[in-house]
C-alpha cells in the first residue's frame, strides 16, 4: 500500500494498484504537479487592485482578505506607491487540509502616479479585508476645467 505523507489530496486512489503500471506513474506525476501548484511555500499571491481617479484624488483599493493591517507596508517614493506584505496560512496542530484554493506568500505591487500627488496627505484604511489608499492631488497641479463658450 502506498502511504502519502503530504497534506494534499491525490487525484487517484492508490490502494490496490500495482506500482509498475503506467496509470500509477502518471498518477504520481499529476499528484506531484498538483502539490507544486498548490504548495503554500511555492505559491504566489498577487492581490487584486483597483484604481480610480476623481478631480481631487486617486483611490486605490487592494483585496487582502485574512491579513492583519500590521502585515501590510505602504511606501511612496519617486511618484510611485508600493504596497507589500505577506499573507500566511494559519497552521494549527492536527489540521489536515483537503483543499487549499487561496493563495499565500509575499507580494509587492507598485503603481506609478502622475506628478500631481500631495504626498504629505496620503492616507490608508483597512476594513473587512480591503485596504483603501487615498492619494490626494495638489490643488495647484491638479489642473483646471476649461469651459467652452
Image (spheres, grey):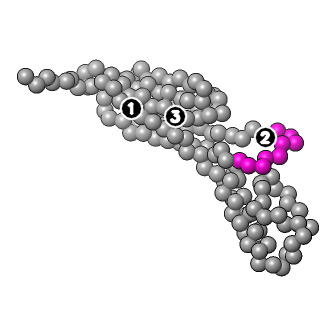
Q: Residues within 10 Å of mark 2 (few under 14, many from 20)?
A: few
Residue denoted by label 1: 52
* Residue 55 shown left or right of residue 88 in the figure: left
Measured as percent of width and height from the top left, residue 114 is found at 32, 35
Residue denoted by label 2: 91
Q: Looking at the picture, tell me which residue is in the foreground, 116 or 42.
A: 42
Q: Does residue 117 appear in the picture of this structure?
A: no
State whether residue 49 is above or below residue 122.
below
Q: Looking at the picture, tell me which residue is in the foreground, 113 or 67.
A: 67
Q: Disc 2 to disc 1, how far (Cα)?
A: 36 Å
Secondary structure beneath dot 1 equals strand
Looking at the image, which residue is at 26% across and 25% down?
Answer: 141
Q: Is there a contact, CB below 8 Å, between mark 3 and mark 2? A: no
Residue denoted by label 3: 62
Q: Looking at the picture, tell me which residue is in the foreground, 53 or 99.
A: 99
State whether residue 143 is above or below residue 11.
above
Amino acid at each position: 500500500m502506498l502511504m502519502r505523507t503530504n497534506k494534499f489530496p491525490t487525484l487517484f486512489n492508490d490502494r490496490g494498484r500495482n506500482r509498475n503500471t503506467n496509470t500509477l506513474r502518471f498518477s504520481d506525476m499529476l499528484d506531484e504537479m498538483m502539490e507544486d501548484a498548490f504548495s503554500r511555500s511555492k505559491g504566489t499571491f498577487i492581490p487584486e487592485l483597483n484604481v480610480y481617479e476623481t478631480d481631487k484624488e486617486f483611490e486605490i483599493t487592494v483585496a487582502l482578505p485574512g491579513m492583519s493591517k500590521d502585515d501590510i507596508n505602504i511606501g511612496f517614493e519617486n511618484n510611485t506607491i508600493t504596497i507589500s506584505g505577506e499573507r500566511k496560512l494559519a497552521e494549527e496542530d492536527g489540521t489536515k487540509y483537503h483543499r487549499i484554493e487561496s493563495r499565500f506568500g509575499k507580494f509587492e505591487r507598485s503603481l506609478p502616479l502622475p506628478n500631481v500627488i500631495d504626498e504629505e496627505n496620503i492616507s490608508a484604511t483597512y476594513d473587512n479585508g480591503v485596504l483603501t489608499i487615498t492619494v490626494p492631488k495638489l490643488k495647484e497641479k491638479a489642473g483646471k476645467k476649461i469651459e467652452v463658450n
